[in-house]
Image (spheres, rainbow, N blue to C red):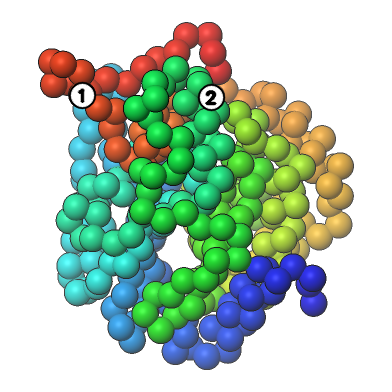
């Protein structure tokens, strides 16, 4: 048992969904090899109510051109199955790809949601990009902001949002029945965990968030936001279980102490370059996936701050 009531409600609903197949959602993943990102459509088979988690807008940086092949594949799946999209869920403000949520919302509807700590991210990166007052730092670019323990539903399937900071201050995990969308807290057991060195990141909080998720039932299905293959593995995999993570995650399995994790993560992060698309991604994703307003010539621009990150 845990004294954490938000976590306990997630544990209870995941356990119930694992025991009764009727409350387990169907999950379809889409993997973008350009950015190593997994997006998901999760739906309640009884009602067809669906959520789209962490979508990708294709972006060709040399030309500054966006395109919608990845998002259109999601739209085609939703239409083929006749699903009704209730939620567009972002686990966090991604630093490696642009979100396609506004495009998907235009075509499919749904409520765009992220964690309430996005305000912190907007404040930090609002300064990095020297945004003026027209850039609201109140999360209003999203339709809904989740706090730790907030419940929601996909048709008949109960869900809970958990705040799991560390990779960024605003990361959320979404527990939808027995399916847990963990964002960038952990990766496949053989690959380990996400970095914690972006502005506002914190390795100690990341460890605490990961270990908190590992209280969920062992049989819970875990859906990752990324996979990079691990040494010795030739295929991309982005689904595992809490039990496999708890016992086998190379960075954070049972027995690893918080201090050991922080030392490992800090040393490793010091060797990593910035993600290729961090500057365009964050500028767009902190706006809920919307582009900056056009300048007087009608063109939208992204900024490239020099010697800042
Ligand atoms: Fe991320």
Residue 154 in sight in this render:
yes
- Local SS, label 2: loop
Front-lying residue, 296 or 50: 296
Residue tagged 2: 274
Most foreground residue, 34 or 113: 113
Disc 1 marks which residue?
A: 294
Q: Is residue 176 above or below residue 143?
A: below
**Which residue of the protein is positioned furthest toward the top in this rendering?**
307
Above or below, comparing residue 44 to residue 76 in the picture = below
Q: CA distance from mark 2 to mark 1?
A: 27 Å
Which picture quadrant has residue 109?
bottom left
Residue at the image point whose x is 56% and y is 57% from the top: 147
In x, y percent, where is residue 76?
18, 61
Q: Quadrant of the C terminus?
A: top right
Which image quarter: residue 283? top left
Of marks 2 and 1, the one in the foreground? 1
């Amino acid at each position: 048992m845990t004294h954490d009531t938000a976590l306990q409600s997630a544990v209870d609903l995941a356990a119930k969904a694992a025991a009764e197949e009727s409350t387990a959602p169907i999950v379809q993943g889409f993997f973008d090899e350009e950015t190593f990102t997994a997006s998901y459509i999760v739906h309640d088979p009884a009602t067809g109510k669906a959520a789209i988690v962490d979508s990708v807008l294709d972006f060709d940086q040399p030309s500054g051109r966006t395109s919608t092949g990845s998002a259109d594949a999601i739209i085609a799946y939703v239409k083929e199955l006749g699903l009704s999209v209730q939620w567009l869920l972002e686990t966090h403000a991604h630093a490696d790809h642009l979100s396609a949520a506004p495009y998907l919302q235009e075509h499919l509807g749904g409520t765009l949601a992220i964690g309430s700590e996005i305000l912190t991210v907007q404040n930090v990166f609002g300064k990095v990009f020297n945004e003026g007052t027209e850039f609201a730092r109140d999360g209003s670019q999203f339709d809904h902001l989740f706090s730790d323990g907030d419940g929601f539903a996909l048709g008949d399937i109960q869900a809970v949002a958990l705040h799991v900071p560390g990779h960024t201050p605003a990361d959320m995990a979404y527990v939808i029945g027995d399916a847990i969308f963990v964002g960038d807290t952990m990766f496949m057991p053989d690959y380990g965990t996400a970095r914690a060195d972006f502005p506002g990141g914190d390795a100690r909080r990341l460890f605490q968030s990961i270990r908190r998720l590992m209280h969920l039932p062992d049989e819970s299905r875990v859906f990752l936001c990324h996979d990079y293959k691990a040494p010795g593995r030739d295929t991309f995999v982005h689904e595992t279980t809490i039990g496999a993570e708890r016992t086998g995650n190379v960075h954070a399995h049972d027995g690893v102490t918080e201090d050991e994790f922080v030392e490992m993560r800090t040393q490793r992060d010091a060797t990593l370059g910035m993600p290729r698309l961090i500057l365009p991604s964050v500028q767009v994703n902190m706006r809920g996936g919307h582009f900056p307003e056009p300048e007087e010539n009608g063109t939208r621009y992204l900024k490239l701050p020099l010697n800042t990150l």
